Amino acid sequence: MPGTVYLVGAGPGDPELLTVKAHRLLGEADTIVHDHLVGPGILELAKPGAEKIFVGKKAGRVCRPQSQIDRLLIELARTGKTVVRLKGGDPFIFGRGGEEAEALAAAGIPFEIVPGVTAALAAAAYTGIPLTHREHSSAVVFLTGHEDPSHTRTRVRWEDYARLGATLCIYMGVRSLQGIAQRLQAGGLAPSTPAAIVQSATTGAQRHAVGTLATLPTLAEEGGFETPALVIIGDVARFAGSLAWFDPSQLPAESLFRFEP
């Protein structure tokens, strides 16, 4: 009988934000197939002798194509191993979990999905930004600033999202932030709309900048912001000043792990 593959969300970085189920599965897995954006404190929860296979991206370089990762998961499960496919954030939020689940289902491999705290929720909470607020925002949209490179044109119609009146949470949007801001303004979103960028949320390297839709691209560039970072655009971003509560400098030494670029 094949083993089970668990597609597990590792959350945004802080090991204490793991779910109880994710923690248990890490201690039971024979093999952990993990991405780059998984804090070292989380990998340390693996049982002694567990095999750890890195398949993520580092410094912009892809370690393995997605098709190879799919085959790897299938091959490991067919040997009877219990496999944890560990992903930063949540497997089904810009984590390619859907593609891997499709491949496993087609191959007849049993699998389970274990949700994790996705970057938008963590970055907002740890910067004091309520993504919804009765007086400021009644809708939230998750968007990606980095689409499949095989697409000849973007599938995100930014001008349309400018008219929703929703809080926009943009993953992987640092490099394209200038163009995104311009298209949102072209769609009617006011240049003065509050906006924030949060890097390495929940970790000892967390930092953020707050400005407006018009000024945030320059703030991000001058501040040297890079992946992993999340952009939040909407009236609620103004709360990053008054409700910010997290101070990375107050973390205990063992929690000060940092993601290497």
Image (tube, rainbow, N blue to C red):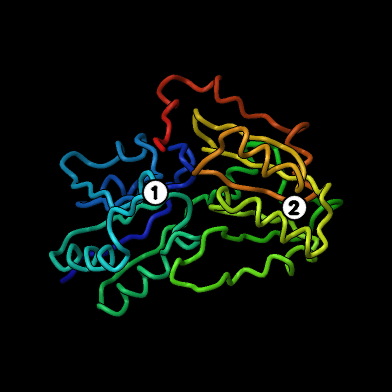
Q: Is residue 71 toward the left or the right of residue 141 in the image?
A: left
| Residue farthest along the left direction in this orientation | 79
> Which residue shows up at 67% across the image and 35% down it?
209
Q: Which quadrant would residue 38 be assigned to in this image? A: top left
**Element marked by disc 2:** loop
| Label 1 packing within 10 angstroms: few (<14), some (14-19), many (20+) | few
Q: Nearer the viewer, residue 53 or 45?
A: 53
User: Percent from the top left, x then y, of residue 125?
Assistant: 64, 41
Q: Nearer the viewer, residue 133 or 218?
A: 218
Q: Which quadrant would residue 95 be assigned to in this image? A: bottom left
Q: Is residue 200 toward the left or the right of residue 69 in the image?
A: right
> Which residue shows up at 55% across the image and 20% down it?
249
Residue 64's place in the image compared with 70, above or below, is above
In the rendered image, which quarter contains the N terminus?
Answer: bottom left
| Residue farthest along the right direction in this orientation | 135
- Identify which amino acid the numbered label 1 is placed on: Gly
Mark nearest the camera among 2 and 1 is: 1
Q: Which mark is residue 132?
A: 2
Q: How many marks?
A: 2
Q: Alpha carbon of mark 2 to alpha carbon of mark 1: how far?
A: 33 Å
Q: Earlier in the sequence, mark 2 or mark 1?
A: 1
In the rendered image, which quarter contains the C terminus?
Answer: top left
User: Percent from the top left, x then y, of residue 82?
Assistant: 22, 58
Q: Is residue 26 toward the left or the right of residue 250 in the image?
A: left
| Label 2 packing within 10 angstroms: few (<14), some (14-19), many (20+) | some
Q: Which mark is residue 60?
A: 1
User: Percent from the top left, x then y, of residue 214?
Assistant: 76, 47
- Identify which amino acid the numbered label 2 is placed on: Thr
> Which residue shows up at 32% across the image and 56% down it?
85
